[in-house]
Image (tube, helix red, strand yellow):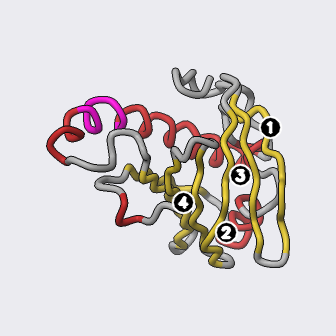
């Protein structure tokens, strides 16, 4: 399993949601949760979801299938996971809920594998010109989907907030 120190940079996004921490946790910690709010998720198949063992897969509308293995489950707050394909192209993802007075923020941070290991010099331009903008757009769509589902109680449609060349 890849570790955070294997990566050079990360991409983070955050959104404000008018819901309690407990209600948000219930949404993001439930089985098949991505099918409710992820605008690029066709299927979110559960592999294991109990006794401290959490693992699933996501099939995107574009046909790509990635496995997710949760390795740090922080009840009521968030989790850390690896996501990747069978070729060892793993990224690290962290989800966190932070509670304010009458709302919460949800943040997602990705340490992607693409242009993010090895030489900082060779990877700097492709990461910041290509990978970071693509992942920022992706995370904005996912978080907007979470906000939409959380506040309106309506399942998000495919590509509801725009398409994405990697996942649509």
The secondary structure that most of the magenta stretch takes on is helix
Q: Which mark is residue 130?
A: none
Q: Nearer the viewer, residue 61 or 23?
A: 61
Residue 92 percent coordinates (x, y): 50, 57
Vertical arrangement, residue 153 with respect to residue 22, above or below: above
Q: Quadrant of residue 47?
A: bottom right
Whichever of labels 2 and 3 marks the residue nearer the N terminus, that label is 2
Residue named by callout 3? 150
Instruction: Report the residue at 70% width, 25% height from top.
Output: 63
For the N terminus, which image quadrant? bottom right
Residue named by callout 4? 106
Packing grade of label 1 (10 A; few <14, some 14-19, many >=20) is some
Packing grade of label 3 (10 A; few <14, some 14-19, many >=20) is some
Whichever of labels 1 and 4 marks the residue nearer the N terminus, that label is 1
Instruction: Report the residue at 51% width, 72% height from top.
Output: 100
Q: Nearer the viewer, mark 1 or mark 4?
A: 1
Vertical arrangement, residue 143 with respect to residue 63, above or below: below
Instruction: Report the residue at 56% width, 62% height from top.
Output: 95
In the image, the segment drawn in magenta is 126-132
SS label for mark 1: strand
Q: Given the current orientation, which residue lies at the most extreme left position?
A: 121
Q: Quadrant of residue 18?
A: bottom right
Residue 22 percent coordinates (x, y): 71, 72
Residue named by callout 1? 43
Q: Nearer the viewer, mark 4 or mark 3?
A: 4
Whichever of labels 4 and 3 marks the residue nearer the N terminus, that label is 4
Residue named by callout 2? 20
SS label for mark 3: helix
Lateral position of residue 18 relative to residue 13, left or right? right
How far apart, in angstroms, are the residues tagged by discs 3 and 1?
19 Å
Whichever of labels 2 and 1 marks the residue nearer the N terminus, that label is 2
């Amino acid at each position: 399993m890849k570790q955070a120190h294997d990566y050079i940079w990360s991409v983070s996004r955050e959104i404000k949601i008018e819901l309690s921490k407990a209600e948000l946790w219930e949404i993001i910690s439930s089985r098949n949760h991505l099918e409710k709010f992820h605008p690029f998720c066709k299927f979110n198949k559960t592999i294991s979801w109990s006794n401290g063992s959490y693992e699933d897969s996501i099939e995107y509308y574009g046909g790509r299938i990635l496995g997710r293995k949760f390795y740090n489950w922080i009840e009521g707050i968030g989790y850390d996971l690896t996501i990747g394909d069978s070729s060892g192209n793993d990224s690290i993802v962290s989800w966190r809920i932070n509670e304010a007075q009458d709302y919460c923020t949800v943040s997602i941070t990705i340490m992607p594998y693409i242009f993010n290991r090895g030489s900082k010099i060779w990877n700097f331009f492709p990461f910041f010109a290509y990978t970071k903008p693509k992942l920022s757009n992706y995370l904005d769509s996912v978080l907007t989907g979470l906000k939409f589902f959380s506040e309106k109680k309506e399942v998000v449609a495919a590509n509801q907030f725009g398409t994405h060349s990697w996942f649509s």
